[in-house]
Image (spheres, rainbow, N blue to C red):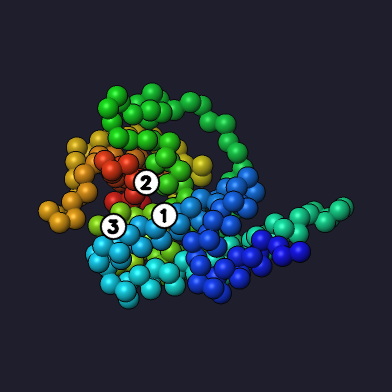
Amino acid sequence: MNDIANQIRDKIADGDLEESLDLAINFLAGRDAILHSECIQHKGRLNERSRDYRLQIISAEAMGMTRAQVRHALLDVVLQRIAVLEKGPQPGVSPPVEPLRQQPHTVTLNFAPQHPSPPPASIASAANGSLADHAAARVLVEEFIKLLATYEVENAAWRAGPFLHRSLLQGEMMQPQFKQNNFYGAHQRFRSYKIPVNFLKVQNTNRTAIGGLRDRDEGEEFVYTLEKTEDNGGMPGTVRVFFPKSGGAPKITLVSF
């Protein structure tokens, strides 16, 4: 029997990353929500960059870099996890706890389902006519923090592209200024914030566009204040999220932990 992991491996060898991702997405649905979401992000990113390449917006080198990154993610994480899921739990044996990947220090986070009190109406839903989806923003920020928890800083920076607005990227890589001034600090201090994420405050920044005339991205931007694990008297952390008018996925525009 040609299992899913081998099918994906064969597709990768043939250079068919799109079909590889489709197989992974279909298999992971209902089995691993985090990795399922990550594969969907990789698929969207690959489609977007392929379109840009066809329109001659990006170079063949940039397109090749994107495909190499997606291929690396499939080989490095997705295939290993799918192989484990395909085997299933052994009778009478508790499944082992999968260690955090590529992490030089121990991070303990509680990802168990929580039952918090309902958020304020201003946070639970956006005003009529707004582009904001605060529930989607919460998922985005939570997955971003989990990325920080899972990988050492440079590896996390390399993988952060799908979470960030293109204004924070140079090609596929994070802008050095954002990396130095914001990302490094976020990686050091993410443990101060609760998982699952809780937004204490939501504000519209009144920003309606990002970029210049040629790469203008219209939409709405909101700043979310995050609840800490304990009140140590410092400034609260915030994450800015941009919701594009085009209907694309929300993206992070600034992180301040």
Residue 50: x and y in percent read 36, 63
Q: Secondary structure at mark 2?
A: loop
- Identify the residue under disc 1: 44
> What's the amino acid at mark 1?
Gly
Q: Quadrant of residue 113?
A: top right
Q: Residue at x 25, y 57 (%)?
A: 167
Residue 225 circle label: none
> What's the amino acid at mark 3?
Arg
Q: Residue at x 49, y 61 (%)?
A: 18
Q: Secondary structure at mark 1?
A: helix
CA gap between label 2 and label 3 equals 12 Å
Q: Residue at x 56, y 58 (%)?
A: 107
Q: Earlier in the sequence, mark 1 or mark 3?
A: 1
Residue 166 circle label: 3
Q: Is residue 146 above or below residue 139?
A: below
- Identify the residue under disc 2: 249
Q: Earlier in the sequence, mark 2 or mark 1?
A: 1
Q: Nearer the viewer, residue 55 or 77?
A: 55
> What's the amino acid at mark 2?
Ala
CA gap between label 1 and label 3 equals 14 Å
Nearer to us of marks 1 and 3 is 1
Q: Is residue 23 visible?
A: yes
Within-10-Å neighbours for mark 2: few <14, some 14–19, many 20+: some
Judge left or right: residue 19 versus residue 179. Answer: right
Within-10-Å neighbours for mark 1: few <14, some 14–19, many 20+: some
Judge left or right: residue 183 versus residue 80. Answer: left
Q: Nearer the viewer, residue 46 or 79?
A: 46
Residue that lies at the very extreme toward the left in this rendered image: 213
Q: Are marks 1 and 3 in contact (CB under 8 Å)?
A: no
Q: Is residue 136 above or below residue 186?
A: above
Q: Are marks 2 and 1 in contact (CB under 8 Å)?
A: yes
Q: Are marks 2 and 3 in contact (CB under 8 Å)?
A: no
